Image (cartoon, rainbow, N blue to C red):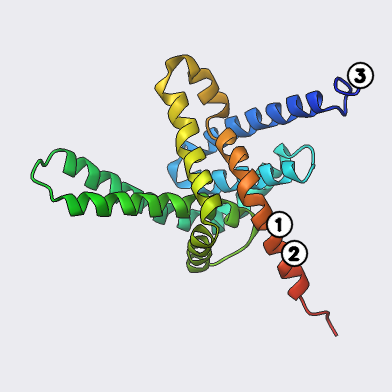
Amino acid sequence: MSSFFSMDGPLMRGLSDLATLMFLNLITMVFCIPVVTAGAALTSMNYCIMKMNEGEGHVISLFFAQFKGNLKTATLPWLIMLILGGFIALDFYMLKTNTGVQRGLVIVLYVLTVLWLALFVWILPLGAKFIYSTGAVFRNAFILAIGKLPRTFFMMVITVLVPGVLIMNMKLYPILFVLGLSLPSYLCSFFYYPVIKEMITRMEENKTPEE
């Protein structure tokens, strides 16, 4: 029982992780205020969360180091996703104001929404751990979204459900402010991190020794 409350016990580790997630959430929210930099901020947050899974401490300082590099690699994929998401949202708005819309078009929009979200939940962790071209990150995100469909499904549910529950209840708004971004990403990491780790292992195994 005493080990449970010790500095290295599960209680203290849990409180430490919670505090880290709260700080990460606050920093990420600030860096997301300029919408253009939100992709780099979210990618950096996912990188720090993966470092938490690896047992590394003081991950907050890693955020700033990663953010600078992610501005170059994560901004364009983020802007593409933002524009695509904007078009989908606009189409839904137009459908809402038009009562004579064909049912097939509504189905297509829902399919596009699911595909957009499936790509989104993989693009961030991929961008956090690997350096890809814009085309490569979308291609690999699509492959993982389909190839790891059960994981993709749970990540999509978490990404939508957690913020949705917090937004719908005003009493939970304080939690939304301190954990609205970092908590869903942390929960998703239990699904995407094993895949990322496996990819890194394969890349290291495939490296040929220098002659």
Residue carrying label 2:
201
Q: Residues within 10 Å of mark 1 (few under 14, many from 20)?
A: few
Q: Position of residue 71 (x, y in %)?
A: 55, 53
Q: Give the side of residue 30 with respect to residue 97, left or right.
A: right
Q: Amino acid at mark 1?
A: Lys
Confirm or deny contact between disc 1 and disc 2 (CB under 8 A): yes
Q: Is residue 65 above or below residue 8?
A: below
Of 53 and 56, nearer the camera is: 53
Q: Amino acid at mark 3?
A: Ser
Q: Give the side of residue 171 with respect to residue 107, left or right.
A: right
Q: Is residue 16 above or below residue 196?
A: above
Q: Is residue 176 above or below residue 131?
A: above
Residue carrying label 3:
2
Query: Which circle marks residue 197 in the picture?
Result: 1
Q: Give the side of residue 83 with respect to residue 71, left or right.
A: left
Q: Secondary structure at mark 2?
A: helix
**The quadrant where residue 99 appears:** top left
